[in-house]
Image (spheres, coloured by chain):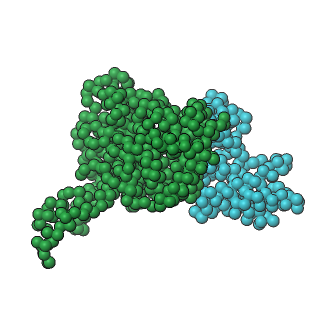
Chain colours: A cyan, B green
Amino acid sequence: MIDAIKEAVLTGDRDKVVELTAAALEQGMQPKEILDQALTPAMDIVGEEYERGDRYVPEMLISAEAMKGAMARLKPLLAAIGVEPRGRIVIGTVEGDLHDIGKDLVAMMLEGAGFEVTDLGVEVTAEAFVQAVRERNPGVLAMSALLTTTMTNMPVVINALKEAELREKVKVIIGGAPVTQTYADQIGADGYAPDAASAVKLAATLA
Amino acid sequence: MALGPLLGGKVRLVSDEDILMIDRTARSILAETGIDAGGEPFLEIFAAAGADVQGNGRVRFPGRVIDDAIERTPKRVLLHSRGGTPPLDLGGQRVHLGTGGAAIRVLDLEDGCARDPKLADLADIAWLVENLDNIHFFLRPVVARDVPPDSLDVCTFYTCLANTGKHVMGSAASPKTAKDVIDLAVLVARGRESLTENPIISFITSWMISPLTLDTGTSKVLMTVAEAGIPVALSSAPVAGSTAPATLSGLLAQAHAEQLSGIVFAQAIRRGAPVLYGTVPAVADFHTMGYAGGAIESALLNAGCAQLAHSIGVPVYSDAGLTDSKVPDIQAGYEKGMNILLIALAGGNYIHHSAGMLESMLTVAYEQCVIDNDINGMALRALRGITVSPETLAEEVIASVGPGGNYLTQQHTLAHIRTDEYFVPATADRQGRVAWETAGSIDARERAKAIAREILQRSRGEFIPSDVERQIRNRFDLANCEA
């Protein structure tokens, strides 16, 4: 059963993963066992294949989606026995910017890697970021911008976090085409990732 | 070397039948799926144009609304230069090549490091382009990072206009700055009417976020520009596999639908508004999901878009000259060489990005402008094809030389070797090995750097007369615009 679930995650067959997870629970397998022995190892393989260049991003995302299908079923069961997610992340595209694909990609990858992700969407104001940090208490706040004209809203959010006395409670990471490590340093962000896979690694070190 | 226009359209990668099928699919997408136009004032504008508008922002387009808009769209757009060069005559299969992009990095000409572009770089690149004959227009290639955002649009256009007489295209961040830029151009053109009759500037507006979603902020800029009667390129940049289907024809169908909706929009704002069909399509690299501008599939998509625009008779803003390489290397050369030649042969009217670009659209290099000037020159030479006439067939001179002779000192030879019959790239080395070694064994990149340095040292022309300069300074605070 474990192997079948792993295989279904690897091929990205969400329906099958959900079905097999339900069957495994019915047979008396523990939620933590399914997570630790099937889902997480499968996603580790996916990650390794991606790193080696054997797997494309869409092929990785489809596996992450399949994993999410199983997690929807397992999450309440895991919470009931006190298993915490790997970390909480709040993510959004900054104010004035409607571009969401890069941000969506990072969010999907983070979820696939076992993080609990709150996606605030696009055109997220500093106030909305601050409110989400206050309410969700995430380990990491991730911001995206595609435009040189909107990336300047990133330091605005960081300042708003300082004013709300939340800056010390959350790590801030940024990304997007015009954003660089230098810019991250300049505005006092905790990290920058050039692509989605690096964003997951970065989050894992910070969350 | 004479500047364009030269005729493309010699390569048709998509059959007429398939173009029809893509067009039909695009129209079906607009009738069934439609676009998301956000809210007002866009819904009212689309409703007035006859589109089917839903309260949730979804707008669907009956075929006759599209046909009416195409009918109203000018089939020819003239973009003017200053200093006596004939205007770019966009439409049909006439090909022009120029810079493009809003790169956020520049390779320093001396140390080769990627750094933030400054306004001085924009001025220098404009002057470089002014001196390179096979770059026909100047679309601001870099974003000056040393200018405050509020002053950026006016400073950008001012700097471009002050350093080249070639046609200047750029963008505006808001309707207010678009109006400022137009006011600036009115002063340079010496009158509003003169500007609309002989537009020396034009705009690029990325009014649509693929798939099928209006960028409501930029769409307001588009409205300002179209209302003023200034030519505008409708830019949407669908990427196969992320913001468009992974199949090339699927992307073309969606992209064409987006363009048709933009044409309806522009014509609803101002009947007869001069617009350019402006898809900037590409495929993704599926390992990074990044924009693979140098991919051969991206070139195929651009050639397809040129054909789609030709099929509805609207002048086309094309895209060639991108490479994913970070430096002017072999990859940059083969990717640019392929896509520039292909899009020129396909008949792109206003081919942007075809000078200076590296790292897709993120970096510009001075020496790459010089190299691309040669690639453009070769592509334009290919467009001219082979002239066949009694004079060029040269039967008389063949008879007079006869078997076993040579043509070295024939008058006929002398009469043709310095004409359009030959294009001589400035950066190519054709010497023998010994001569090349004696000259320092340098490669094309180094030769291009030397040419760029020489041009940058030339004394610069005055592109804005002093009386106009005074008027500009009375109207605008140019404190942030000192390049």
Q: Position of residue B45 (x, y in %)?
A: 55, 33
The answer to whether residue A59 is above or below residue B261 is below
Farthest residue in the bottom direction?
Answer: B404
| Residue B480 in view | no
The residue drawn where x is 64% and y is 58% is: A60
Residue at the image point whose x is 59% and y is 50% from the top: B28
Residue at image position (47%, 28%) is B176
The count of marks equals 0
The quadrant of the rendering that contains the C terminus of chain B is top left
Image quarter of residue B100: top left
Percent of width and height locating residue B478:
36, 27
**The image quarter in which residue B52 lies:** top right
Q: Residue at x 77, y 47 (%)?
A: A84
The image shows residue B476 at horizontal and vertical percentages of 37, 24
Quarter where residue B42 is shown? top right
Asked whether, in this view, residue A197 is left or right of residue B455, the answer is right
Name of the residue lying farthest toward the top: B474
Q: In this rendered view, identify the residue nearer to me: B112 or A7.
A: A7
Q: Is residue B403 visible?
A: yes
Return the x and y of residue A23 as percentages of the image width and height: 85, 60
Reply above or below: A108 against B43. below
Residue in front for this viewpoint, B39 or B68 = B68
Image vertical order of residue A135 relative to residue B370, above or below: above
Task: Locate residue B455 relative to residue A71 in the image: left or right.
Answer: left
Seen from the viewer's position, the closer of residues B236 and B445 is: B236
